[in-house]
DNA sequence: ATGTGC
């Protein structure tokens, strides 16, 4: 049996009539593809089905997904591969879901799929999710896997899907409007370096739980400039505005270590990076539009219009929430600054309306960039070359050749401003907890068809390399959970994380190498690396139950 | 990622 020394083939068998009844099966390399041989794979499958799936008289075998039946030796030779699922039948026809029959008539089986990863680790499940989504949902014209691509429950994360005529809410996910914003602080780097990071971490208190009063929260969510542009979602959800949330969300005090001149940040500056989304509000919207397993909405349907209206509101809500998080953190970091007075829940409010307006104006002045990386954006597609770059090409690809398309982003940052459609000068590419945040400048060379090949998007982070469950089980030995994680090595990061599971789930080891992710984007031509930031204090969450704050 | 699922 060790004659060939070949590894066994790993397959799954399941009942044709009930595919939830399944069992793994290892086929030794000595097993025979001829179904009539006594040592045939067929016999091994039947025996395992009898003992593990309790089917009395197995007689036929199908490949799950395609429904192809394995009959002759050629079928068994070509059909049995690692990770294939075989459905065992007692004689009845294939009753599994036939993937080909489930394809939408407006699906695009030849939808181009670009994967921008070569140095960054790639997960085969995430790749399968990317390809399956591209080929089976209606209206897709392009799918892009960013180098931080990793598997989601059904659809991948770190992915961009461009469609025409159809909107697919699950491709944005529940955290609609999630994104990142960078704010300048007036701290000097000397105030946060080395062991001073501990002091900074200790100062970050009173930033959990609801901010001030119902009325003040509603006022914050009202858009002062435009009548009726409030993004308030009702007190049911507005109570969680300005809370960071769990998962990979954080607020981080960083030092700009290196940066090219003229891109909005200066070397040695101390900045605050906020990564947060729409909490329960966005997921309530997704739920509402995906009841009964519905995935796709026809672009001009009343339902699609309603979804987009609610989606846009959740995006504004999440942006207002990031600003409010910044207000509270800045009130801790710059305690003397009058504009941040309202950041404290116990501060007296003379004229709330004025105080909020002043805080928003000052936040606007400090904000370097704020992007959504979970959203759908209506754009003219395909993208045109930048104005004045190549007049011949420009006239060939004139605006008349463009038409409406929807860019669905799930964990992918945009390269153009959604309001001006002009290139964003810089974007953050944060690593996880203590690893550097790269400063990227989006690029639009003709080699990427002016941003088309990366779907006008970049990676939004390092991307998980380990599932939360795996990180929890394998890394829990390695970290001693404490309320403040001390830096490992010289000028590392102080991490405030009073949720034990998150300590492991968000460990740097559970993520890909952010430098590799950045290099992939640079190599592809989608970005330039113009600098990096060192995280000094990373705030995830504090348990302030029963305490003032 | 989550006022967390059946």
Image (tube, coloured by chain):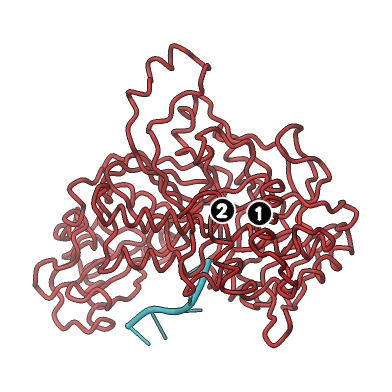
Res A10 label: none
The crowding category of the residue bearing disc 2, from other C-alpha atoms within 10 Å (few below 14, some 14 to 19, many at least 20), is: some
Label 1 packing within 10 angstroms: few (<14), some (14-19), many (20+): many
CB atoms of marks 1 and 2 within 8 Å: yes
Q: For this rendering, which residue is in front, A279 or A233?
A: A233
Mark 2: which secondary structure? loop
Q: Disc 1 versus disc 2: distance between alpha carbons?
A: 10 Å
Q: Which chain is red?
A: A
The spot of residue A442 in percent (x, y) is: 58, 35
Q: Residue furthest top?
A: A392
Which residue is at 45% across, 34% downward? A453
Q: In the visual, does A315 lie left or right of A155?
A: right
Q: Is residue A122 visible?
A: no
Nearest the viewer among A241 and A212 is A212
Image-based side of A327 in relation to A210, left or right: right
Q: Which residue is the site of mark 2?
A: A224
Residue A314 at x, y percent in the picture = 46, 59
| Tag 1 and tag 2 share a subunit | yes
The residue carrying mark 1 is A360
Number of labelled discs? 2
Please say whether residue A514 is visible from this viewpoint: yes
Q: Chain of mark 1?
A: A
Q: Which chain is cyan?
A: B
Q: x%, y% of residue A549?
A: 72, 78
Q: Nearer the viewer, residue A496 or A6?
A: A496
Indicate whether A268 appears above or below A502.
above
Q: Chain of mark 2?
A: A
Across and down, in percent, residue A155 comes to: 39, 58
Sequence-first tag of 1 and 2:
2
């Amino acid at each position: 049996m060790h004659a060939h020394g070949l590894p066994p083939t790993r397959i799954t068998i399941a009942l044709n009539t009930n595919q939830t009844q399944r069992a793994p099966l290892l086929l030794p390399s000595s097993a025979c593809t001829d179904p009539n041989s006594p040592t045939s794979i067929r016999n091994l499958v039947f025996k395992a089905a009898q003992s593990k799936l309790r089917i009395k008289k197995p007689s036929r075998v199908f490949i799950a997904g395609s429904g192809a039946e394995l009959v002759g030796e050629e079928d068994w030779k070509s059909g049995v591969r690692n990770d294939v699922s075989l459905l065992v039948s007692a004689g009845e026809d294939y009753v599994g879901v036939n993937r080909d029959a489930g394809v939408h008539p407006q699906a695009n089986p030849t939808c181009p799929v670009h994967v921008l990863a070569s140095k960054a680790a790639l997960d085969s499940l995430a790749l399968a999710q990317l390809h399956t989504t591209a080929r089976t949902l209606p209206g897709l014209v392009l799918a892009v896997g960013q180098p931080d691509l990793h598997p989601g429950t059904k659809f991948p994360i770190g992915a961009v899907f461009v469609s025409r005529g159809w909107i697919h809410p699950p491709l944005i996910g529940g955290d609609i409007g999630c994104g990142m914003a960078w704010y300048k602080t007036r701290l000097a780097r000397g105030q946060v370096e080395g062991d001073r990071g501990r002091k900074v971490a200790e100062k970050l208190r009173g930033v959990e739980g609801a901010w001030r009063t119902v009325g003040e929260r509603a006022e914050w969510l009202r858009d002062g400039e435009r009548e009726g542009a409030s993004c308030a979602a009702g007190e049911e959800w507005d109570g969680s505005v300005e809370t960071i949330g769990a998962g990979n969300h954080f607020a981080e005090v960083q030092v700009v270590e290196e940066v090219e001149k003229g891109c909005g940040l200066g070397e040695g500056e101390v900045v605050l990076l906020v990564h947060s989304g729409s909490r329960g509000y966005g997921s309530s919207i997704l739920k509402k539009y995906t009841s009964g397993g519905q995935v796709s909405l026809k672009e001009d349907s009343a339902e699609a219009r309603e979804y987009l209206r609610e989606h846009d509101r959740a995006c504004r809500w999440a942006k207002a929430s990031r600003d409010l998080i910044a207000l509270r953190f800045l009130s801790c970091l710059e305690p003397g600054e009058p504009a941040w007075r309202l950041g404290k829940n116990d501060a007296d409010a003379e004229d709330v309306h004025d105080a909020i307006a002043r805080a928003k104006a000052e936040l606007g002045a400090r904000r370097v960039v704020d992007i959504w990386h979970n959203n759908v954006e209506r754009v003219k597609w395909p993208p045109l070359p930048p104005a004045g770059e190549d007049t011949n090409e420009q006239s060939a690809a004139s605006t008349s050749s463009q038409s409406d398309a929807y860019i669905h982003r799930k964990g992918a940052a945009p390269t153009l401003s959604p309001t001006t459609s002009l290139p964003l000068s810089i974007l953050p590419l944060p690593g996880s907890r203590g690893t550097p945040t790269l400063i990227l400048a989006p690029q639009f060379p003709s080699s990427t068809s002016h941003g088309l090949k990366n779907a006008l998007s970049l990676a939004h982070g390092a991307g998980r390399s380990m599932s939360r469950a795996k990180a929890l089980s394998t890394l829990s030995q390695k970290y001693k959970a404490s309320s403040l994680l001390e830096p490992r090595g010289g000028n590392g990061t102080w991490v405030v994380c009073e949720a034990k599971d998150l300590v492991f789930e968000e460990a740097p080891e559970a993520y890909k190498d952010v430098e590799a992710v950045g290099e992939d984007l640079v190599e592809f031509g989608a970005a330039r690396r113009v600098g990096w930031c060192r995280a000094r204090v990373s705030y995830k969450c504090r348990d302030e139950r029963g305490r003032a704050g």
